[in-house]
Amino acid sequence: MVAGQSSREPRFVAQSQPQVGASEQSPRQSAGHSSGRSSEHGPGPSAGSSGGSPHRSSDHSSGHSAPPSPGHSPVQKPGNGPGNGSGHDSGRSSGQAPARDRRRQATAWREARALAARAGRGAAPRTQRLPLDRTLGHVLAEPLAALTDLPSFDTSAMDGWVVAGPGPWVLGKGEGGSGELGILAGHSTPVPLPDGAGVRIATGARIPANATAVIRSEHAHVDEAKGLLYAQRQVVPGQDIRPRGQECRSGDQLLPAGTLVTPAVLGLSAAAGYDELVTVPRPRVDVLVLGDELLTAGLPHDGLIRDALGPMIGPWLRALGTEVSAPRRLGDDAEALQHALTTSDADLVITTGGTAAGPVDHVHPVLAKIGAGLLVDGVAVRPGHPMLLARLPSGGPYLVGLPGNPLAAVSGLLTLAEPLLRGLGGRASEEPYRVVVRDEVHGHPHDTRLVPVIHRVRSTEGVGSGAGTGGEHVVPLHYNGPAMLRGIAAADGLAVVPPGGVRSGTEVEILDLPWASATPWTEGCFT
């Protein structure tokens, strides 16, 4: 376990359940997947482009709700844990829910996301002290308080002359008889300045006692013959002087705990006197790629397809501020999955595929066998319905099970993994925001939809008039089926579309992608 992990209280941990072999599981209905159609979005690509096996139905209601075989004991739900709102009966000890009940039991999208965030915030706090040059990208574990006044002494804000009293001013040689150089930054305290005198001064240099103001070089004239300095503009007492403590006083809180350490935060920390910072360790994540049908190179052939999730998930998680191990490709091997879960010392394990109820979907049976506590078992969202969130026993890692279809997996990352990791990493939750959508977006009859969008600035003709949009709107992107990545690759966010859909001009909540602020807003051929 990572430092501090063993102290986690094993909340949500269920009693060990008997293992269910592949022969005891009911085959999944996969007509929608094998036919090349998505039951959610109409025509879609063939299974070969989905990133999942042809026998997987990782995001279709038919695949998620196949009736179980007799004697299949589900992973036990905690009776009073945060997952209780998912609709699962914690007292049910045998028999999986009938197909007609599974959709009703799916946790509402907002509830699932909030539950993941609470789980992350409820983990035992951990801290580490790092040298300043190693803290970039970490999160402050405690508020950043100034260790000194900023600036710590009165300084010149400009190159020019520092003067005392009214002018014209007799020019002095300045500090230590340095002649034309005058008072320089980084030198000792200069001697007090007599009334009626002036001396050259550099930006950042200490202001001598009794000084009235600093006159910028371009705002003064020197009469060399008389040795006098004349101001060409009115001189206001205190002008171009940065007084001690102007930015902060020693002890002032500069930044709250939970602040991401950016280059600017590093600079402020150094200026405020820090050599090291107390930060929250980055959450550690293991990624387990499931599926015998996945290729790591070359073109699809003979029923084998390229793994789209292995290359994507690690960088995505790193963008969320985590330490990610190299993806481990386990195939459809229940024993290998069990060993990987029970030996992981990560904070979170991500699995891809295998979350439904087909003959080689081993995630649920393995979780049952090792006694994991299931917090979320299915979410009322499209794509991504069969995602899950669990806690391994004895204070072990959390597990987020992602569907095998690529866009469905993205939905799982944003719904469960992102808010969980924010809590584990000490980051504050992002405040939701809403933007007008340009086009009508069809919705699911019962579930939330997550639709890739791109931001635009509304033209003078415009559409809609939602409050607070400032002329901005979002454009839904095509290629948004659960097996497709073409739309999300061009997107900078996902629109949260309520059941039933929305009309053009309606405001929708937006989930930003981790790299959205660095991505140009371009449509290309994707709209």
Image: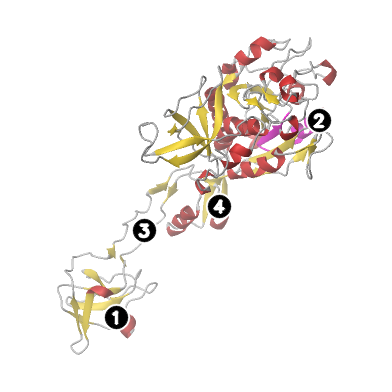
Could you tell whether 449 is left or right of 37 in the image? left
Residue under label 3: 150
The mark found on residue 203 in the picture is none
Could you tell whether 444 is left or right of 391 in the image? left
Spot occupied by residue 321 in the image (x, y as percentages of width and height): 58, 44
CA–CA distance in space, label 2 to label 3: 60 Å
Q: Looking at the picture, which amino acid does disc 1 mark?
A: Gly
Nearest the camera: 503 or 368?
503
Q: Which residues are magenta?
A: 335-353
Quadrant including the N terminus: top right
CA–CA distance in space, label 1 to label 3: 25 Å
Q: Relative to 455, is 365 above or below?
A: above
Could you tell whether 136 is left or right of 167 in the image? right
Of pointers 2 and 3, the one earlier in the residue sequence? 3
User: Which structural element holds mark 2?
Assistant: loop
- Name the residue furthest bottom: 225
Residue under label 4: 135
Quadrant including the C terminus: top right
Q: Determine crowd level at label 4: few under 14, some 14-19, many 20+ residues with C-alpha closer than 10 A.
A: many
Of pointers 1 and 2, the one earlier in the residue sequence? 1
User: Which structural element holds mark 4?
Assistant: loop
